[in-house]
Image (spheres, rainbow, N blue to C red):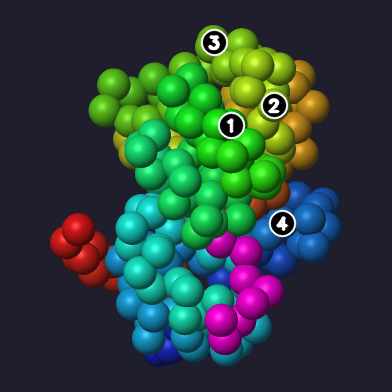
Amino acid sequence: MDLPATSDERLDAVLADIARYAKRNDRDPADIALMAVSKTKSAEDIRPVLAAGHRLFGENKVQEAAEKWPDLRAAYPDVTLALIGPLQSNKARQAIQVFDRIDSVDREKIARALARVMQEEDCQIPILVQVNTGEEAQKAGVAPMEADAFMAFCREECGLDVQGLQCIPPADDHPAPHFALLGKIAARNDLSILSMGMSADYDAAIAMGSTIVRVGTAIFGARTLAPKQ
């Protein structure tokens, strides 16, 4: 079956899929948020999705988001924007000025930098901890066995508002065991947000309890090259 031609039509199709997968798993569709991943997409690409009423977006790079989102947010001030890609400590201040949540915290250095900047800026924005469920050397994220201690560090030593977890399963693995592992870590740490599932596997993520699915290509189409920074 051909995909809908426009991004707003594709958005509607994804929302319909989420509702169908939720009901299949005896879940309320309202408990599953759709994050439109707009990385590498221009403001012009994003505007039709905003005009369709969508308000939750994810970006991978601080500088890219800082360049394209101010005008969009001026027009749509109720947007929620999350950083889902790796954060460098020297970008912590800019990140908290641009984003409403940081979903990719995975190192003590980053946690300390965010805590320091939030104190200096007199603000507190929530974070998610990224877990490297496949323990892949090339991928960001805290190891599963270290996740509990890292979250305690974030909460107790840094005073950060840890609300949930994010993961990206290995591309060659079935995602369900990784989603199940993330769910167990969240449950024992009393976390309510599970950001898991992307364009290719959000049906499995919903079955395993995801509360946020991150969908880019199924809404915006094929990824374009990121702008040079």
Q: Residues within 10 Å of mark 1 (few under 14, many from 20)?
A: many
In this picture, is 59 found above or below 17? above
**Residue 115 at what x, y percent from top left?**
58, 31
Frontmost of labels 4 and 1 is: 1
Which amino acid is tagged 2? Gly
Name which of mark 2 and mark 4 comes first in the sequence. 4
The 10 Å Cα crowd at callout 4, few under 14, some 14 to 19, many 20 or more, is many
Marks 3 and 4 sit apart, C-alpha to C-alpha, by 27 Å
Of labels 3 and 4, earlier in sequence is 4
| Label 2 sits on residue | 159
Vertical placement of residue 51 versus 135, above or below: below
Marks 3 and 2 close (CB-CB < 8 Å): no
Q: Residue at x 16, y 61 (%)?
A: 228
Q: Is residue 219 visible?
A: no
Q: Residue 145, which numbered label?
A: 3
Type of amino acid at the residue the image marks with label 3: Met
Q: Earlier in the sequence, mark 4 or mark 1?
A: 4
Q: Is there a contact, CB below 8 Å, between mark 4 and mark 1?
A: no
Q: Secondary structure at mark 2?
A: loop
| Residue pointed to by mark 1 | 115
In space, the residues marked 3 and 1 are separated at their CA atoms by: 23 Å
Looking at the rendering, the stretch of residues picked out in magenta corresponds to: 74-82
Residue 123 is tagged as none
Q: Amino acid at mark 4?
A: Ile
**What residue did someone put label 4 on?**
32
N-term mark: 3 or 1 = 1
